[in-house]
Image: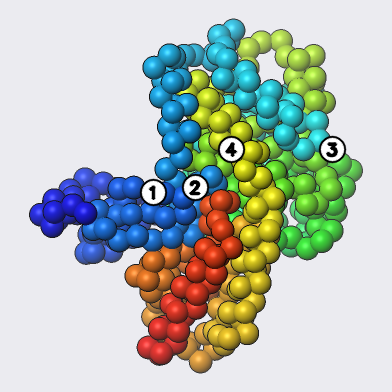
């Protein structure tokens, strides 16, 4: 652990200079950082005070292979000292980006075959909207520019991605969003058809969806939902885009979340798990048909690209990360341990009146809380439980959008059976304490 004075200094500097994403600025000023992490090993994180906690969220649903993986550090160092970065614009290329794009084509569902790289998920989403619109320009239907997404969806925070995000508080945070974005009920295919009819199919470029809605509270679509919306998109010639930023790279017990639904997208966004968070990388993949159309119809340059598109070090890390996922059977492990996690949460539901619903697919899970008897509480029950859990050594997340009172979990895919049990017991104890306090 650090000396007390050093910790105090770090806390003061944090308050003064570090503007945290999604923080309550007031709370941050009053309380300072809850954890200043300094080290990670597997599913565990250690802070500067010496507290050790289970990273039950894989940080932001992304540290799939767990913390502290030497192999990834070594690959990053080797690539950085040889060639950390060079441009991928126009005709410049580099070996890790080439090899990664080929590997992704091998892994991705259907005939997704060509990747446009970005630095993260929001950029991947914006890229998808722009490529979709550009596609329709090339196809001679430039009026097709509307993008439809689902309520409770989260697609990121760039202007386009915020506009697509169905969780209203994210949109309300800022004024004047991007035009031509629409949202439909997240469980009802008929709502999609009605919106398309009302807006005019000839004005709609694409529909985008997470295979499992993550930040919105781990919402899993009903059995035939995706088949039906895909059929609707096909009927009206609308591009079907999946946002696999969370669900990609094994999280749901398959390589990509949409594989549970027996359909394949025209485009697929990914980020997070592609590097398990060891480097900043995302991208969009195009189906063979779209890629062929782009090749056939483009007359000028593809005027879109980020400085870090195809970053050599990030791509080298991604390749090694994918190798680890394959070698250690982590996709299968997510399925098996995910089953165990949901079982454990059902046990919680049986034992704790507060838990009213359990959801899960692979290592993405949620419990919904009913606070029937506790209506008058000021802060949501889920927040109190999450705080208690953190004190006891488990990081999980409270979701309170749309009047929900939900706790979500997404531990690293390397998690072991006994660690799953520990997670469930810690959550049980946290609920116990909150129950007693009321
Ligand atoms: N799409 C989904 C489904 C996400 O969960 C996220 C981030 O949580 C994003 C997009 C945005 O990714 P990033 O934060 O890397 O920009």
Disc 3 residue lies near ligand 1 with CB under 8 A:
no
Looking at the image, which residue is at 65% across and 61% down?
338
- Quadrant containing ligand 1 reads top right
Circle 2: element type: loop
Check disc 3: other Cα within 10 Å, few if <14, some if 14-19, many if 20+.
some
Q: CA distance from mark 1 to mark 2?
A: 8 Å
Q: Which residue is mark 1?
A: 40
Compared with residue 175, is residue 317 higher up or lower down, i.e. above or below?
above
Compared with residue 73, is residue 433 higher up or lower down, i.e. above or below?
below
Mark before the other along the chain sequence, 1 or 4: 1
Circle 1: element type: strand
Disc on res. 237: 3
Image quadrant in which you'd find residue 347: bottom right
Mark before the other along the chain sequence, 1 or 2: 1
Check disc 4: other Cα within 10 Å, few if <14, some if 14-19, many if 20+.
some
Q: Which residue is mark 4?
A: 324
Quarter of the image where the N terminus is located: bottom left
Mark before the other along the chain sequence, 3 or 4: 3
Quarter of the image where the C terminus is located: bottom left
Asked whether the beta carbons under mark 1 and mark 2 sit within 8 Å of each other, the answer is yes
Taking 303 as reference, is 254 left or right? right
């Amino acid at each position: 652990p650090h000396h007390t004075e050093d910790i105090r200094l770090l806390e003061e500097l944090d308050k003064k200079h570090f503007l945290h994403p999604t923080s309550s600025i007031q709370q941050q000023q009053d309380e300072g950082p809850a954890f200043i992490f300094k080290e990670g090993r597997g599913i565990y994180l250690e802070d500067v005070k010496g507290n050790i906690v289970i990273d039950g969220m894989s940080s932001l649903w992304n540290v799939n292979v767990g913390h502290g993986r030497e192999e990834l550090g070594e690959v990053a160092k080797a690539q950085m000292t040889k060639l950390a970065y060079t441009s991928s614009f126009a005709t410049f290329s580099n070996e890790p980006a080439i090899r990664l794009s080929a590997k992704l084509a091998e892994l991705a569902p259907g005939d997704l075959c060509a990747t446009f790289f970005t630095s993260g998920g929001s950029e991947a989403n914006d890229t998808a909207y722009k490529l979709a619109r550009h596609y329709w320009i090339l196809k001679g239907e430039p009026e097709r520019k509307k993008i439809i997404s689902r309520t409770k969806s989260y697609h990121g925070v760039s202007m386009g991605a915020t506009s697509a995000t169905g969780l209203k508080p994210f949109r309300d945070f800022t004024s004047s969003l991007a035009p031509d974005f629409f949202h439909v009920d997240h469980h009802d295919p008929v709502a999609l058809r009605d919106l398309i009819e009302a807006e005019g199919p000839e004005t709609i470029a694409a529909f985008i969806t997470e295979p499992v809605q993550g930040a919105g509270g781990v919402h899993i679509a009903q059995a035939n939902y995706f088949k039906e919306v895909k059929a609707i998109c096909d009927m009206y010639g609308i591009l079907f885009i999946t946002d696999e930023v969370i669900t990609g790279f094994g999280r749901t017990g398959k390589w990509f979340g949409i594989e549970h639904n027996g359909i394949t997208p025209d485009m697929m966004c990914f980020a997070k798990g592609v590097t398990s968070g060891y480097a900043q990388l995302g991208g969009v993949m195009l189906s063979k048909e779209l890629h062929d159309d782009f090749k056939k119809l483009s007359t000028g340059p593809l005027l879109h690209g980020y400085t870090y598109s195809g970053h050599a070090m990030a791509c080298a890390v991604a390749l090694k990360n994918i190798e680890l996922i394959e070698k250690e059977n982590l996709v299968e492990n997510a399925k098996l341990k995910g089953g165990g996690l949901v079982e454990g949460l059902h046990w919680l539901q049986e034992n704790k009146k507060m838990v009213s619903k359990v959801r899960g697919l692979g290592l993405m899970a949620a419990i919904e809380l009913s606070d029937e008897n506790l209506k008058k509480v000021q802060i949501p029950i889920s927040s109190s439980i999450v705080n208690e859990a953190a004190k006891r050594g488990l990081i999980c997340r409270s979701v309170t959008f749309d009047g929900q009172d939900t706790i979500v979990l997404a531990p690293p895919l390397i998690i072991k059976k006994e660690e799953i049990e520990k997670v469930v017991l810690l959550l049980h104890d946290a609920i116990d304490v909150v129950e007693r306090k009321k």
